[in-house]
Amino acid sequence: MKYGFIKNLSINTANGFTTTLCSDELGNKVVIKKYRGSKHDGNYSRLLYESRVGKILSTKSTLAVKFPDIVEVKRKDSEISVVYEYIPGRLLSGFSLDYQAKAILRVINGLTEITKKLSAKDKEFIVRRTFFDFIIGLPIFCLLFLKISPRNFLIVSRAFFDCLVNLPKLYFRDLALAHCDLKPENIIVSRGMIYLLDCELTRLTHRKFDYNKIIASRVNPRLSDLLHKNHQKLSNSTLINYLCLCYGSSRGRETSYTANYLASLNKYNP
Ligand SMILES: Nc1ncnc2c1ncn2[C@@H]1O[C@H](COP(=O)(O)OP(=O)(O)O)[C@@H](O)[C@H]1O
Ligand SMILES: [Mg+2]
């Protein structure tokens, strides 16, 4: 199938993915997410993983949360394109804060429900992030964080000891699907339905992962504060500490990104 270009939707400088709105030969709109680069690149594999997870999840859509269908995946040695069904609607970021919080809760509960519908083969394919991954990563993230920001030694050490003592107490037995990049910019509201995009980081992991990652990341501080206040059973200070250490150090240099996670370390675990 050939597609005609309509407009760019996003150019992601972090991973080199471009997302464009196109139309197929019948005039139907589609969304094409493309990566140009060798098939041995990490980003090529990431987009391939996104397409495979997307195929699994689109067959498991529920009333609570849906996923765009994948029309086709085109692969060459130097390029991969994933063609998605176009979802008309608005990004969740355009809605009121209360609605955003409700929709996020709906997505998280929806993902737990969908986990129950996964076959053994599906589960084998989706990458797991277990308690051992958390514990093994912990000292590495702390050292990286301190290298980026040595003046925050105290707060980082405090978070480290909290994780060391309390991570083993978190219940890691029933792993659930987590999107791992859940934010209003990856959610489309279409005729009252909620669609989840951008599943490249989807994992089977602790079921509170997504909720606390949104709190920790402070991309929208008011949303983080609302989620932290709203559902005390879902927000967990040790997970927030862990996710701050993990993601605050992940770019290897001090950015506004690290500053957000530092603000969370200070704010939610003073
Ligand atoms: N199936 C789709 N239907 C409509 N819009 C989409 C679709 N997929 C992506 N988009 C739009 O493109 C943007 C970027 O897509 P996304 O998959 O989140 O890529 P990125 O990795 O660049 O964040 C989204 O925020 C959304 O506005
Ligand atoms: Mg996105």
Image (cartoon, rainbow, N blue to C red):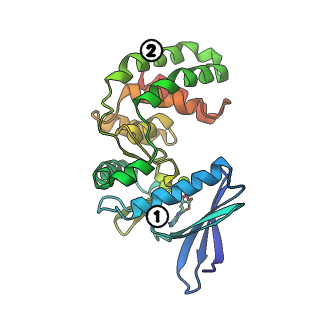
Q: Residue at x 45, y 66 (%)?
A: 68
Name the residue: 54% across, 26% down: 262
Structural distance between the alpha carbons of marks 2 and 1 = 42 Å
Query: Would you say residue 226 is visible in this rendering?
Result: no
* Callout 2–callout 1 Cβ contact below 8 Å: no
Per the rendering, the mark at residue 90 is 1
- The answer to whether residue 160 of the structure is visible from this angle is yes
Residue at 58% of width from left, 56% of height from top?
47
The N terminus, quarter of image: bottom right
User: From the image, which quarter does the C terminus lie in?
Assistant: top left
Q: Which residue is mark 2?
A: 161
Going by the picture, which residue comes out furthest to the bottom? 26
Mark 1 lies on a secondary structure that is: strand
Question: If the picture is divided into quarters, which one holds ligand 1?
Answer: bottom right
Give the residue type that dot 2 points to. Phe
Q: Residue at 66%, 29% (x, y): give it.
A: 254
| Image height of 72 relative to 53, above or below | below
Question: Closest to the observer: 87 or 72?
Answer: 72
